[in-house]
Image (tube, rainbow, N blue to C red):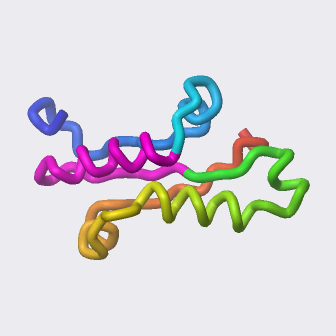
Amino acid sequence: VRSVGIDWVLVGHSEMRTLYDERDAACNAKITRCLAEPGLKVILCVGETLDEFESDLLETVVGLQVRKGLAGVSPDDVADRVVVAYEPVWAI
């Protein structure tokens, strides 16, 4: 994607998680692939459903998505090449 001028990749968007059952492990694999390409940056989308929000699971769900999504990613890559975007599914 860098060869066509794309600098950022969106991973874990709520629609991918909901409609295509994209799991945290798949997000992690995509992030790892993206970061293997020099200069490519990642936006990791995280957020809870309305049921999870109403059950006071926001911190648990989002924390797991971040930890699993970024598992094995170096702190330098996280600091320089990853942005975490909070998008609660219920608010969209």
Q: Does 67 appear above or below 30?
A: below
Horizontal side, residue 87 vs residue 41: left or right: right
Residue 5 among magenta residues: no
Highlighted magenta segment, given as a residue range: 24-45
**Image mark count:** 0
Name the residue located 27 percent from the left edge and 53 percent from the top edge. 41
Front-most of residues 54 and 84: 54
The residue positioned 35% from the left and 60% from the top of the image is 82
- Residue 6, percent from left and from top: 22, 38
Looking at the image, the residue that sits furthest to the right is 54
Furthest residue in direction top, as rendered? 19
Is residue 26 magenta-colored? yes
Q: Is residue 65 above or below residue 90?
A: below
Q: Position of residue 34 (x, y in %)?
A: 24, 46
Position of residue 46 measured from the top left corner of the image (x, y, whole percent): 58, 52
Q: Residue at x 53, y 40 (%)?
A: 23
Q: Residue at x 25, y 74 (%)?
A: 76
Please name whichever residue, 31 or 39, is drawn nearer the observer in this view of the structure.
31
Which quadrant would the C terminus be assigned to in this image?
Answer: top right
The answer to whether residue 38 is left or right of residue 15 is left
Work out which quarter of the rendered image holds the N terminus and state it.
top left
Query: Residue 46 vs residue 8: left or right?
Result: right
Query: In this image, 68 relative to 80: left or right?
Result: right
Image coordinates of residue 91 in percent, x first then y, are 76, 44
